[in-house]
Amino acid sequence: MRGSPVRFLAGVLLGLLALGGSGLATAAAKQATKQAAGPAAADTAGGFRIDTVSAPRRGGENRFPIVAGGSEVARAINLFLHSIELQTQPGGDSSAAFAALPRTTLGIDYQVVGNSARLLSLRIERLEAGRLRHPRGAGWTFDTGSGRPLAIGALFSPEGYGRLRQRVATQRVQRVRNLQQTLGQDADDENTTAETLAIYDDCLDSIRGDTLTDDQLFIGADRIVLEHGDCAAPDYLDYDVLRPLRVEIPFTELAADLNDYGRCLLLGSGRTPCPAMVDEGPQPGSYAGTIGKRPVTVVFERKYDGDRISGSFVLDRRYHRLEGRSQRDGKAKLYETGASSDELLCEFTLFGKPDGRIEGTWRSLADNQLQPLVLKPLR
């Protein structure tokens, strides 16, 4: 290769920003600087105070958000974020908060994207080995009335969600087409151009058929933002110059596509807390309860396309991962696995109740010990 792909494609990117760049990135950075600069950042109107837990790391500092205030909703959000991103529980000293990070994670930081009386939206950004120039950003947005994490589909009517998918795909395809046309006119570095064009040729089908369920969702003061996953493999991220293929849409342009819950959260229509649709079975969010007589906290992370569920639980001060599937009539089965995915350690059989509670059993597969389980959502 005759030149650096980073230097060559930087000029291409500058031209493309005018065709599809994001204004939210700048706005989010300014808001994050204001809200997360110190250990006790100032409130926004009606929003949470976001504190910061931090600890030194090689070459910098690890930082992570703490929702202040001590309410059940704050506890639910903190438990969810710590369980997923740090694989631990909130509390303890700052060094312990980051002790369970994988060795491949070189640093972690956050930004506050939106913080209002109805929504809290955060970006958790990881610096990972092999991706030093390409941090990975995860988006988490919460209903501040319930503390539940939001999936993009929960905000839209079925027809509106279909229109959203089409709109997002159209914008992303157009950005790729613009890039292909621009690169086709500039053959200064043929090898770099060929690599970049090949990446996006392969990615177009994924972009067109994106269900949005794996996109990162951010909600700012007046718009939603969806970020697509990488088009390139880790070793080729220098050529993935459009990552993360961000699309942003003002709330006002979505009004006809939102359901009542989405209009309540995004447009401020209706009473608070905003009444969400009640689905069967375990829902993403934070729960507390008992296994037998032992206290347990459980976080259900995501529901994926189909019936898969992922999560975690803390029992006897130990963190455990969970994977499983939802079944009919609100029933779900999840398992803790050992060193290999084939080694099953315990089984959760769960039944969702109309009021959001979960009942069922926990069974140790080593000795077939069976205990009753009761969970209530934190909110």
Image: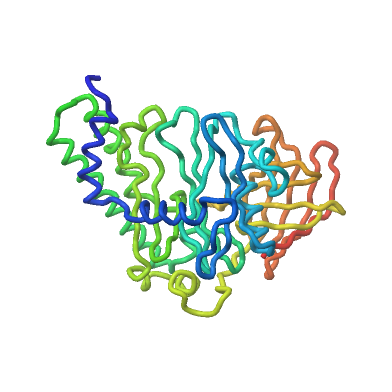
Residue 216 image offset from top left, x and y in percent: 45, 50
Residue 178 vs 237, above or below: the answer is below
Q: Is residue 60 left or right of residue 89?
A: left
Residue 209 vs 259, above or below: the answer is above
Give the position of the N terminus as an image quadrant.
top left
Furthest-bottom residue in this view: 270
Nearer-the-camera pick, 203 or 121: 121
Residue 341 image offset from top left, x and y in percent: 65, 33
Q: Is residue 82 visible?
A: yes
Task: Determine the residue positioned at 54% across, 63% down.
Answer: 43
Q: Is residue 259 left or right of residue 341?
A: left
Q: How is the image coloured?
A: rainbow
Give the position of the C terminus as an image quadrant.
bottom right
Residue 194 image offset from top left, x and y in percent: 23, 29
Residue 203 image offset from top left, x and y in percent: 32, 40
Task: Determine the residue positioned at 82% across, 36% down.
Answer: 366
Q: Is residue 378 visible?
A: no
Nearer-the-camera pick, 150 or 219: 219
Residue 184 figure quarter: top left
Q: Number of marks in the image?
A: 0
Task: Determine the residue positioned at 59% across, 44% down.
Answer: 85
Task: Determine the residue positioned at 79% across, 39% down.
Answer: 365
Furthest-top residue in this view: 1
Nearer-the-camera pick, 286 or 134: 134
Residue 142 figure quarter: bottom right
